[in-house]
Image (spheres, helix red, strand yellow):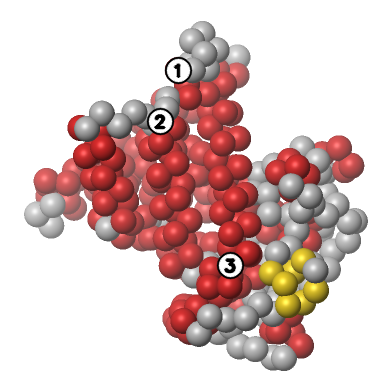
Amino acid sequence: MFTSLIECFIDAFAWMQTLLFEGLVQPVAFALGAGNILDVAFEGTGWLLIGVLQIVFLIVLISPLEKWRPIEPVTEPSAVKIDVIYTVIHRLGLFKLVMFFTFENAVETAFGMLRVHGFPTLNIDALWPGITDIAWVSFFIYLIVFDFVHYLVHRGQHQFNRWWALHSLHHSQRQMTLWTDNRNHLLDDVMTTLVLSVVAKLIGVGPGQFVALVALSQLSENFQHANFRCSFGWLGDRLLVSPRFHRLHHAIGIGHESAGRQTLGGHNFGVLFPWWDMLFKTVDFSNRYDPTGVRDQVEEGRDYGQGFWAQQKLGITRMLVKDKPS
């Protein structure tokens, strides 16, 4: 039953992708003289469609939850509007388009050369014939592997001064909402995307599976950032990351600090599952909803930028001067 539902969804998505590509994207590509990259354009159409569906999901399903049980009133709507810009850039394919023709193309070329020289790829879905080649089983295994890698990346963002100088932009949002997930420095996003792309190549994730993995993670993170008073209970919070669990990660003095205010670290780095935080002792299950932000932003009035370009510029400045943890 579950497998049939997945197959129906895949078929429906493939039909919509083909329809959008043949009706809009392909004619535009030919008109622009880009008929030689139709394969890239078709893949990009998939990402565009996923992004549109995600935004509809956010507006129709998650936004009403914020209005129903908000953690705090939104007193700075202009800050939220900037987060919407970040979401549009990422979900409607603008960021992905740039990555296609630069860094990801370089990764694809490098792996192509490695395969020519016999470099092996670990295909997880072929490890246990009859079991791991079942679509939902292999997808769940990939999901766990990706979540673990995402946890390690997130730990790195909070552990190294120069990386934190970029990632702190994400934590500087005092008005967390469902739009906050994509509020990241572009260079930070490039680094994270490259790591995940390389891992996908190493373990044999197919293009369709990769899109599904990213889309599921993104929607989960949108929900976790929502201004929605919600936990999953004692057991549920130990199975999946809830809005309450993740809000503690953004809490001033908790989410990005460990042993004192001058030590980078923090708690609750998990993206989908809290298991890694429990395993590596970075977990905090406190039943509370604290204010969010960065300590020096609150105590010293540090400026993290009011607009998109100001935020990007200040992130680079913090990184270049080897910013100290605050």
CA neighbours of label 3 inside 10 A, class few (<14), some (14 to 19), many (20+): some
Residue 38 is drawn in which quadrant? top left
Q: Which mark is residue 160?
A: 3
Q: Which mark is residue 81?
A: none
Q: Which residue is mark 1?
A: 126
Q: Where, quadrant-wise, is the C terminus in this rendering?
A: bottom right
Q: Which residue is mark 2?
A: 204
Q: What is the C-alpha distance between the residues marked 2 and 3?
A: 30 Å
Report the mark closest to the observer, 3 or 1. 3
Secondary structure beneath dot 1 equals: helix
Residue 275 is drawn in which quadrant? top right
Across and down, in percent, residue 228 comes to: 77, 58
Secondary structure beneath dot 2 equals: loop
Task: Indicate left or right for 60 with 22 as reference.
Answer: right
Q: Earlier in the sequence, mark 2 or mark 3?
A: 3
Report the mark closest to the observer, 2 or 3. 3
Residue 199 in view in this figure: yes
Q: Earlier in the sequence, mark 2 or mark 1?
A: 1
